[in-house]
Amino acid sequence: MHDLSKGFASRASRRGVLKGGAALGLGALSLGKVGADRTLAQDSGTLEVFSWWTSPGEAPALQALFDAYSAKYPDVEIINAAVAGGAGVNAQAVLQTRLQGNQPPDSWQTHIGRELIDQYVVPGYCEPITDLYTGEGWADVMPEGLVEQATWESEQYSIPVGVHRGNGFWYNKQVMADNGIEVGDTMSVDEFFAAADTLKAAEIPALALAMKDTFPGAQTFENTLLGVVGPDTYIALFRGEAPWDDQGVRDAADAYAKMLDYVNEDFSALSWDQAFALIIEGKAGFNSMGDWAYGEVVAKNAQDNIGWVSHPGTNGSFVLVVDSFTLPVGAPNSENATNWLTILGSKEAQEAFNPLKGSIPARTDVNRDIFSPYHQWSMDSFANDALAPSCAHGQASSPAFKQAFYDASTAFVTDKDVDTYIAMLSDAAAMDAETTE
């Protein structure tokens, strides 16, 4: 189990990542008093919520949060300002333009970690919400490491609403059965290639890929990288403590290039949820995707035919992708926005949201029995496995390196040039180190 012990408590520690292991588990914690009846004065007007949750599996989960808010504040009109595009690729560009023009929404979605801190807190776009953490007792019911990733210089700046596992490897059970492929509790890289050869002989794409959103290429590589080099080296790479021209990185790139020989031909035209639909529809074998994909399974009532394992080689690791919401500086309806954050941090809202979204709650005092077998599997992994923050989703690296990671991965999906890929990642890491120093 790897200790991701560095948080964001001070400017000098910005490069740190999340604490890991059982310390972040979903076991019993001493619960503080949660201010469930806390209500601010303003209870009418509007509330503009900015996110990128628009897919068939994401929208119902977002609506569950809206419903929880409206149940307590029925006179507030909620404006859903969601912008389509996986991993917030499009939404973040729109948001940045609005923030630079001093036109913030009342709250926006972001990932905790370096995305929150580097893109929004340090530039001065977010108000601290430390008083909410204190008043609502959130620090008593959320893992310390999650709180640290929402913290900058002793102040909290966002409320985590769901913890996603980024290294899921999803498959269609019927496709596997029809082709004589047995998938166990875990899958190695070699076992995937054996299954892929069988599916290729049946003219079925073994790996459903989407590059319209751009993030799946980077995410599939980071999962493959984790599977090849293990969590210690993976974390060291994104901390700048290991070189990107390491042989392990090259081995991972070689494995990824081989995986790309088994993808669907139309990958460049598909969004992530369209690629995942190929799995649900039995038109492809596997898909490497975070467990927001489980929201698509629920939305299409496909629970009986979709199975999951960790991305090949990554059993024993949990790739963190944690969604949260902020209180902007200059929020047009700041009291409504504060009430929104208070609702998001509640046990009731997190129990309503996460079963639909595929994530597990940030709170540890939820009723485990209401969650699906997948969620319970993810809860166990979160409690016991090595925690590795995602670069593709902004938690492990600076925004600049994340973009370089995207660019290099997008090129690699097309040309499979390992030498160029390694060189691009090495150059980006060197530039990032110079900027951070």
Image: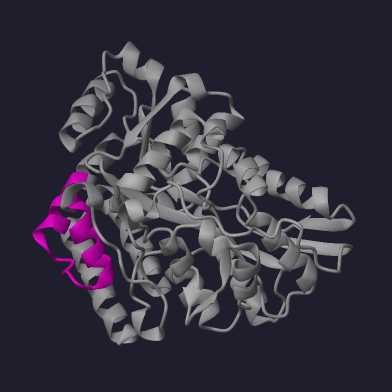
Tell me the residue at 50%/44% (across/down). Answer: 359
The answer to which image quadrant residue 200 occupies is: top left
* Residue 236 on the magenta segment: yes
Q: Is residue 45 above or below residue 310?
A: below
Residue 279 at x, y percent in the picture: 44, 28
Left or right? Give the position of 430 relative to 33: left
| Visible residue check, residue 230 | yes
Taking depth in this image into account, of 296 and 84 the one nearest to the observer is 296
172 w.r.t. 23: above or below: above
The quadrant in which the C terminus is found is bottom left
Where in the figure is residue 362, as x and y percent of width and height? 51, 53
Residue at x-position 25% and y-position 32%? 186
The magenta span reads 230-255
Which residue is rendered at x = 48% and y = 26% of the image?
A: 280
Evaluate whether residue 283 shows in this view: no
Image location (x, y in percent) of residue 193: 20, 32
In-image side of 107 versus 320 (left or right): right
State whether the magenta stretch is mostly helix, strand or loop: helix
